[in-house]
């Protein structure tokens, strides 16, 4: 195999994306996950200080985002681990949705 053939094969496998670009995207996604987790903690702390309770809304968004990300990884990579993690995050997401609905029903039920 000549040098040109190796380069051509590599270009085909990378589909026009170079390694640096892929690494930057992975780093950006990792930073986004951790910073969104930190923001959820910050918003929850502020809510706790001023209202005396933690609101489920920010955690619904966070776990919804994580479940979607891991489902996408599962469908692209076909790894069972990604599916199990996605299902775990989906279960937490569903529990938070249920808790939020119960909270809203209790709040609106007592006001009516």
Image (cartoon, grey):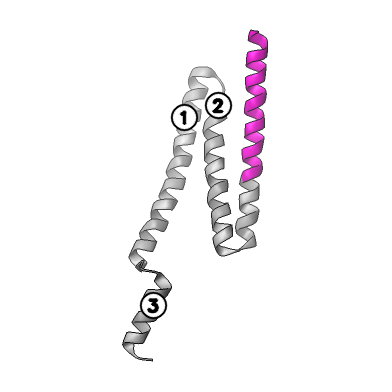
Instruction: Point out the tag, 2 or 1, that comes first from the N-terminus.
Output: 1
* Marks 3 and 1, how far apart at CA: 45 Å
Instruction: Find residue 10 and report its image quarter.
Output: bottom left
Does dot 2 land on a helix, a strand or a loop?
A: loop
Relative image position of residue 46 (x, y in whole percent): 46, 25
Q: Name the residue under label 1.
A: 43
Magenta residues: mostly which secondary structure?
Answer: helix
Q: Which residue is drawn at 36% across and 58% down?
A: 24
Q: Which class describes the residues within 10 Å of circle 3: few (<14), some (14-19), or many (20+)?
A: few
Q: Which residue is drawn at 40% across and 69% down?
A: 15
Residues at circles 2 and 1 in contact by the CB criterion of under 8 Å: yes
Instruction: Point out the tag, 3 or 1, that comes first from the N-terminus.
Output: 3
Instruction: Find residue 52 and report its image quarter.
Output: top right
Instruction: Point out the tag, 2 or 3, that comes first from the N-terminus.
Output: 3
93 is within the stretch colored magenta: yes
Between 81 and 10, the residue placed more toward the observer is 10
């Amino acid at each position: 195999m000549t040098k040109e053939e190796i380069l051509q094969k590599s270009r085909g496998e990378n589909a026009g994306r170079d390694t640096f670009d892929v690494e930057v995207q992975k780093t950006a996604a990792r930073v986004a996950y951790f910073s969104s987790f930190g923001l959820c903690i910050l918003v929850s702390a502020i809510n706790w200080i001023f209202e005396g309770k933690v609101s489920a809304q920010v955690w619904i968004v966070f776990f919804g985002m994580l479940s979607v990300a891991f489902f996408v990884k599962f469908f692209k990579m076909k790894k069972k681990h990604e599916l199990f993690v996605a299902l775990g995050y989906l279960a937490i997401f569903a529990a938070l949705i249920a808790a939020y609905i119960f909270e809203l029903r209790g709040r609106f039920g007592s006001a009516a």
